Image (cartoon, coloured by chain):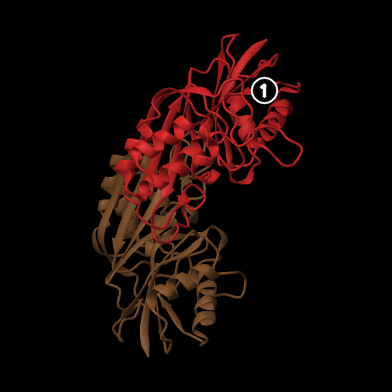
Chain colours: A red, B brown
Amino acid sequence: MRNISLLVSYDGTSYHGWQCQPNGITVQEVLQRAIETITSQPIKMYAGARTDAGVHAQGQVVNFHSESTIDLRSLAKGINSLIPPDIRVKTASEVPDDFHARYSAKSKAYVYCILTTTYNSPFYGRYAWHIPYNLDVSPMDEAIKCLMGKHDFSAFKKKDEVYHSTVREVLRAGVKQRKDFIYVILEATGFLRYMVRNIVGTLVLAGTGKLTKEGFLGIMESCDRQKAGPTAPPKGLFLREITY
Amino acid sequence: MRNISLLVSYDGTSYHGWQCQPNGITVQEVLQRAIETITSQPIKMYAGARTDAGVHAQGQVVNFHSESTIDLRSLAKGINSLIPPDIRVKTASEVPDDFHARYSAKSKAYVYCILTTTYNSPFYGRYAWHIPYNLDVSPMDEAIKCLMGKHDFSAFKKKDEVYHSTVREVLRAGVKQRKDFIYVILEATGFLRYMVRNIVGTLVLAGTGKLTKEGFLGIMESCDRQKAGPTAPPKGLFLREITY
């Protein structure tokens, strides 16, 4: 049995997230169906991160075991010919037998994109949260840096979501501005559901002067979801890279 | 009567070009209907450039005369609230009575975008011509520079299109690479229909080594459309800016 890994990019606009579910079409379902068509075998596929509905990915990683002997370039090409253009397999590679897209991951990096032009963009409207006024980036960057290291992030989790542990370790955190775009970058050993989007929704309050760095830190330390800001919309979120 | 000018950006994917026509929905039609709804008056609208079906614009300029006294910010906001998100009015301004979006234009700049990754991008697939192999940019840049100045561009016109004169003056011409993207930049006093796309289709031959700079110049000088390369697809073309 070969263990095959795919690097996958997708525009999540039209999908009900990554994971198969009864209510709507998902990225996993589309990919899995194409792979099973090509290899003529049912497969069990694992993903590095389960992105939510409307969230995009530039660096999703999956793996599956297969008896198929198809060469890897043909596999990637074949899958791409069977799936819609908003999902693309970038590369296919053979990985060691014990590689698991989810459990072998050392860290995941997300980027959240905010567009601050007065009018929205016809080109970036699907890929950014449009906030039609200027945000002050330096207090946002100062605030997000409070998240570095190991913390209990339950203030930023999805309401009612239950975990064994809500402690995660943030390895990289920053907010940058390029022209009209603001990028929030977060890399961590793992994320709680909605964590990036809840952090972004709270950071925006820092960007408008409504929240200080100390206030932001206080929210994290409170472990109280009620104290944090609103959940930023999914369309601005990109799973950028998974490190193994 | 005020003379009002709008700076407009649109994703041309879903439209049958700029200009009103019986066969399908156009950008002009959508904009004009929204303006007439807001001002409660029929208007005659002029555009700086009549983009073809599927072509995008970041800097389309239009003007129309109106008796309406609506303030300009409300006009722009009002139009944007009535039209789909793939067309956006960036700004509205009052211009001198004799300003004409088309006839007052000194030059127009277009950018054509080529994506050279092996797989297409789920994010840029609508906004770039996907050529899944590397192109050599320096012969493309050398070739396009032959177009600088006044020339008869009939080798690059749309077949069977008839003009009083097929002479145009190119003010800026260049090909640049940034990571996996190649950008073809052309600014001229005016363009023939399909001119940019036919130039790009021919430049790609230079990028693959099939055509020298001298060969490219020869095609231009032949004034023979048959000698030039294929028409590049509309989705890579952006009307970037009109200068007055």
Camera-nearest residue between A57 and B210: A57
The spot of residue B83 in percent (x, y) is 54, 68
Residue found at x 39% / y 79%: B71
Q: Quadrant of the N terminus of chain B?
A: bottom left
Q: Is residue B18 visible?
A: no
The spot of residue A239 in percent (x, y) is 50, 33
For label 1, the SS is strand
Decide if residue B72 is on the left or right side of residue B144.
right
Eyeballing the image, is A39 above or below B138? above
Eyeballing the image, is B11 above or below B189? above
Q: Quadrant of the C terminus of chain B?
A: bottom left
Eyeballing the image, is B15 above or below B207? below
Q: Is residue A39 visible?
A: yes
Number of marks in picture = 1
Camera-nearest residue between B157 and A121: A121
Camera-nearest residue between B117 and A96: A96
Residue found at x 38% / y 35%: A144
Q: Please state the chain letter of the residue tagged with numbered disc 1 in the rendered image.
A: A
Decide if residue B136 is on the left or right side of residue A114.
left
Camera-nearest residue between B218 and B37: B37
The spot of residue B66 in percent (x, y) is 42, 87
Q: Which residue is mark 1?
A: A45
Amino acid marked by disc 1 = Met
Counting other residues with Cα less than 10 Å from the Cα at mark 1, is it few (<14), some (14-19), or many (20 or more)? some
The spot of residue A114 in percent (x, y) is 43, 47
Say which quarter of the image contains residue A88: top right
Residue found at x 55% / y 64%: B84
